[in-house]
Image (cartoon, rainbow, N blue to C red):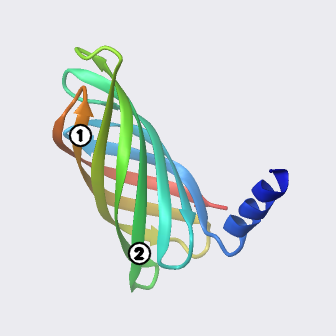
Amino acid sequence: MLLLVAVLGLTFAVNAQNWIGVRGAFGSSYGAELSYQHGFNANNRLELDLGLNYHETYGYYNLSAVYQWMGGLVDNLGWFAGIGANAGLWDGYNDGKFGLGFLAQAGLEYNFQAVPFQITLDLRPQWDVLGAASGFGYAGALGIRYRF
């Protein structure tokens, strides 16, 4: 089992672009998320976000996973788009209720050359299909991440 974990870890580490940072969300809800991106190659990556967000009458803790496709525009400016899912716990009028939903994400990113930082601006519509806050919502976000 240990050997399998080591091999998988090395496989993900070879030529990978890994980023860690924060996303600040605004829109039908607002909040902050810890964000991690794992690049599989130059055109695909996985983004995982763990956050605390607020709506007008409730707050929620969420975990989102988004598979993204990427492309370049000019120099260090690129685009990304993806699909994924989120799960969360809602607090407020829905005390302690679990929810599950689907989401899409599209945005722009700028990767600095001289320093290992990335800035992103994205829009993330989502549809919560199960649980406390069923329905459609959206959020934009400004993100900053460090490459390691």
Is residue 144 toward the left or the right of residue 131 in the image? right
Name the residue: 78% across, 58% down: 4
Residue 70 at x, y percent in the picture: 41, 75
Precedes in sequence: disc 1 or disc 2: 2
Where's residue 11, x and y in %?
A: 71, 68
Q: Mark 2: which secondary structure? A: strand
Query: Residue lying furthest left in this view?
Result: 135
The three-letter amino acid code for the residue at tag 2 is: Met
Q: Quadrant of residue 40?
A: bottom right
Residue kind at label 1, given as amino acid type: Asp
Depth order, front residue of 85/106: 85
Would you name the residue on which mark 1 appears? 128
> Of tags 1 and 2, which is closer to the observer?
1
Query: Which residue is painted at 46% across and 79% down in the image?
Result: 76
In this view of the protein, which residue sits in the foreground, 118 or 10?
10
Relative to 52, does residue 42 appear above or below in the rendering?
below
Measured along the vertical axis of the image, is residue 125 above or below residue 131? below
User: At x 31% / y 14%, what residue is drawn?
Assistant: 95
Residue appearing at x 76%, y 55% in the figure: 5
